[in-house]
Image (spheres, grey):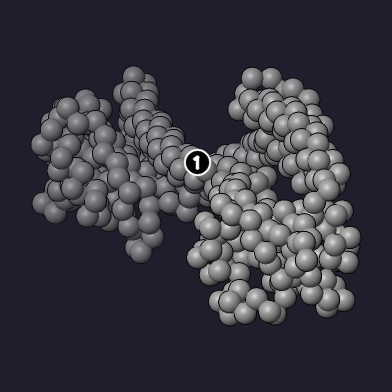
Amino acid sequence: MMNFFRNLSLLSKMTLIVVVILVGFFAISSWLNFRQQQESVMTEAVEKARIVAFEAIRTREYLSQQLQNGQVPLSLERYGLIPVVASQRIGADVAKDVDYRIRQTSRRYRNLKNAPDAFESQALEQFVADPQLDEKYAITELQGEKVFRYLRPFVVDQSCLQCHGDPATAPDFIKRLYPPEQDQAYNYRVGEVIGAASVTIPMANLDRQLMANLRNTLVGLGVIFLALVACLGLLIRFAVTAPLEHFGRAIDSVIRTGRFEKQLPDRGSDEIGRLIRGFNSMMEDLQEKTANLEESDRRFRALTETARDSIVSFLANGQIILFNRQAEKLFGYSKAEVLGLSISDLVHEKCREFHAVGVEAYLAAEAARLITETRRVACRRRDGEMVYLELSLSEAESDGHRFYTAILREAAS
């Protein structure tokens, strides 16, 4: 994996890093947005359930008030006008439209359909125990289905006492339907909690709404993410990698041609701009030094090529690096042929001591004496002919490399 990343181009590396960072931010933002959407959907669910429950209670209270104000006597034929019954049926019709479940429940119920389940019983007990508590909601399970439950209490008013007060004053048809000795819904007092409006919302509905909201948000974030990646890629390309590619091509040109005239255009005072100015300054300095070096080399070559003596320079390992014109005439080798050969190729086999130990060992042992005195040496021309030469040796060092220069002339017989 590291080798794969190392071999990528700079633009690819920077783009990949940016993408990884943005993906991290995208994931964090998505999670936070998901939590926010959850809270928003739950808040909306509470508000909707609160409105539905409140309207169910208001419907019951309104019907009760109208019946009381109009002094409408209740009868078996008008059973559907009983406030609790009417609001229950209205709630059922509304539930069909909004896909909610709306009903009224009570601990002292008359109709078995109004019997509270475990969650409703707990809520009703809390409403009775705490008159200031005006609602109760939570996410629970109902018959194996995950649902949102909401309950809002309603209390007894004067109109409720007609059917739920003293059994002696209750309408005859109520007493026939719900005999006082068997019914638990009599003997309420004004202000007492008589029941609650119960709203149930399937979580599947809320989850669909949550996912729809989240999907829309993620699409928007995804578009922004892709736009950011594209913009940052173009910015990196324009501001970093393109100038560096130009810079790299300039260095390749210098390496390939060996010329230092290449100058890059100035691009400001940023890091790449300072790098380019440093490169241009280095090119100017190298161009000047190269010109001086070339001039010095020309003078040196002119000096060695016009010398009357043979001049041969070689490294400590014996490799020949300079061979002037007089040396060519003396040994019969051209400069092109001899450069790279060993100095031992020019020493005759008669110098057994030299050939026995090799160039480096011989120079290590004898160089100090050879530098201080002129010595007569048996040498060999290209055709194998032996010739005696007078040798004057000097030693120098350049860039950590030691080399020797031998000045040779034919010895007198």
Name the quadrant of the C terminus.
bottom right
Q: Residue at x 19, y 43 (%)?
A: 124
Q: Residue at x 24, y 48 (%)?
A: 120
Q: Residues within 10 Å of mark 1 (few under 14, many from 20)?
A: few
For residue 80, which quarter of the picture?
A: top left
Residue 349: give x, y in percent of width and height: 70, 80
Q: Residue at x 81, y 36 (%)?
A: 299
> Is 349 on the left or on the right of 144, as rendered?
right
Farthest residue, direction front: 413
From this viewpoint, is residue 80 visible? Answer: no
- According to the picture, the residue beneath numbered tag 1 turns out to be 25
Q: Is 88 drawn above or below residue 375 in the view shown? A: above
What type is the residue that disc 1 sits on?
Phe
Q: How many marks?
A: 1
Residue 397: give x, y in percent of width and height: 58, 48
Name the quadrant of the N terminus.
bottom right
Q: Which SS class for mark 1?
A: helix
Residue 279: give x, y in percent of width and height: 69, 31
State the residue in front, 114 or 335: 335
